Image: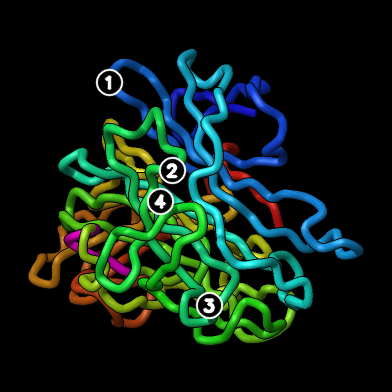
Amino acid sequence: MISRGPDQFGPFESAPVDVSRQEHRPLWVEAAWRDEDGTIYGWYHHEPGEVCPGKPGLTAPKIGAVVSFDNGASVIDLGIVLESGEAPDCNAKNGFFASGHGDFSVVLDRGKQYFYFLFTNYGGDVREQGIVIARLAFEDRMRPVGAVRKYYRGEWEEPGIGGRMTPIFAASRAWQSEDTDSYWGPSIHWNTALERYVVLMNRSCCAPGWPQEGIYLAATYDLADPTYWSRATKILDGASIPEHPGYYPQVMGLEAGGTDTEAGLVSRLYIMGVSHWYLRFAYAEATPPEEPYDGTTTVGPQALLGGPQVGLNNRLHFRPKPQVNTNRRVRR
């Protein structure tokens, strides 16, 4: 299904999308990028069935690629580009995943050299679980199968199918546990005001049922060197999110050309496809404006969402004003 509207606030018109192949259903397109010639490249989260016999609730997600030449009316499935090399653990107690790669986002670097995938690794050695990163050379975007490389121990040499990983935000307790403690579902964008990449993440901790402990934020100047990421900072408590269970944070830029992968000083924060807040970034030395944006204030330093001062070199402020984005999928 694809929804179109004049801007992120709608109104929207929805229509089914013709998918060329059927073997990777169900799928959710979680990231897309439009080329200068109008071609749309997309990447999807696929949850195969019958991964664990007798346990239909457990699957092992994979990440695949699609391309559209008709503005999203139909897509051609290019195949799976990221897949775990670990066997499913059918004794996993998180309720959803026995292993796999999924719940991700993709951003093109500023030099148009690589597409970077930030995704969640749900299986294998706990030392490789959590938020991990891989990349695809820009020139390989039409032939992505076998071309994606994972980051591992300072190098970008591990294959996307199988391949080992070094997490950029590691799990503290394995996803096989019912009380896992891990970040997941990263949503990355380039922030034009900060001139750095910003990622929002969920955190599941530390009880059964995949609870949303909170929304976290981190930033980096250089995607090519994952050691530059700042520490993850909590910006919103899970209990304060009106929508339950409060998954899938993402921003939408408000400037002309703003998207979920490029935003500026002020953007909308969406959680589960609903926006109750603005996000405002400000450098520590910034002077609060005489007329705060729609009721927000701007003070620094350090980054946060309308709360105490912790984290990055900026601070976020937001104000209730619900808006609904019907394009965001809600799975769990």
Furthest residue in direction right, as rendered: 54
Callout 4: few (<14), some (14-19), or many (20+) C-alpha neighbours within 10 Å?
many
- Near-viewer residue (27 or 77): 77
Q: Secondary structure at mark 2?
A: loop
Q: Earlier in the sequence, mark 4 or mark 3?
A: 3
The answer to whether 239 appears left or right of 321 in the picture is right
Q: Residue at x 67, y 22 (%)?
A: 16
Horizontal and vertical percent position of residue 20: 63, 22
In the image, which is nearer the foreground, mark 2 or mark 3?
2
191 with respect to 174 (left or right): left
Q: Name the residue type under label 1.
A: Glu
**Which labelled disc corresponds to residue 91?**
none
Closest to the observer, 112 or 244? 112
Residue drawn at x 50%, y 24% is 5
Q: CA distance from mark 4 to mark 2?
A: 31 Å
- Residue count near mark 2 (Cα–Cα under 10 Å), binned few <14, some 14–19, many ≥20: some
Q: Identify the secondary structure beneath mark 1.
A: loop
* Label 3 crowd bin: few (<14), some (14–19), many (20+), radius 10 Å: many
The residue labelled by disc 3 is 182
Closer to viewer: mark 4 or mark 2: 2
Q: Which residues are magenta?
A: 218-223
Judging from the image, the colouring scheme is rainbow
- Asked whether 232 or 286 is in front, the reply is 232
Say which of marks 1 and 4 sits in front.
Answer: 1
Could you tell which of marks 4 and 2 lies nearer the N-terminus?
2
Alpha-carbon distance for marks 2 and 3? 28 Å
For label 1, the residue is 36
Asked if residue 119 lies left or right of residue 102, the reply is left
Q: Mark 2 to mark 1: distance in Å?
A: 25 Å
Residue 229 rendering spot, x and y as whole percentages: 26, 71
Residue under pointer 4? 251
Residues marked 1 and 3 touching at CB (< 8 Å): no
